[in-house]
Amino acid sequence: MTTPQSPSNVDGNAVAAQLQPILLDLVALALNGKQAHWHVHGRNFFSVHEHLDELVDDVRAHTDRIAERVVALGVAVDGRAHTVAEATAVFPEGFLADDKVLSLIIERLDTAIDHARKAVGPLEDIDLASQDLVLEALQMLEKHRWMFAATAK
């Protein structure tokens, strides 16, 4: 099987090196967000439960955009379950109090935000289109972090 060729002179491998960690963070956020969505309980159940669904929807959309960008540049991405589990933190099993869910989600968002911020600079020199995708994802992640943190207070 042949690999797709990049449609431009962009170094797909260099882009993939920046985007792969972000992709893993986003896949993990979607999985952990759903796990928390199903198991959250407490006084803020409804608002946290609903906000987790919004987070998952937003994260999945950005996950797809980032993965498709790398693939469009002729490089395979790795979003397999074992790769995600090895590279990211997995939520605890079972029911969790709303304050614990908020704390864990904020930690995971902080990690994803950190990885995205670290990729912005290098991508400026490699591929502005990919940098734009990361900036869009970063804005989404920071918005959700702000909202979860406001709920946690």
Image (cartoon, rainbow, N blue to C red):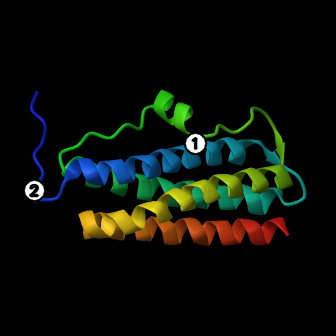
The residue under label 1 is: 31
Please tell me in which quadrant of the rendered image residue 95 appears. top right
How many residues crowd around disc 1 within 10 Å: few (fewer than 14), some, or many (20 or more)?
some
Residue beneath the point at 90% across and 58% down: 43
Please tell me in which quadrant of the rendered image residue 113 appears. bottom right
Residue 31 drawn above or below residue 141: above
Please, what is the three-letter code of the amino acid marked with disc 1? Leu
Q: Nearer the viewer, residue 101 or 23?
A: 23
Residue beneath the point at 50% across and 56% down: 115
Task: Tell me residue 32's x, y (percent).
Answer: 63, 43
Residue 58 drawn above or below residue 82: below
**Local SS, label 2:** loop
Task: Please identify the quadrant where the C terminus is shown.
Answer: bottom right
The residue under label 2 is: 7
Residue beneath the point at 75% across and 32% down: 93
Mark 1 or 2, nearer chain start: 2
Query: Can you see residue 28?
Result: yes
Please, what is the three-letter code of the amino acid marked with disc 2? Pro
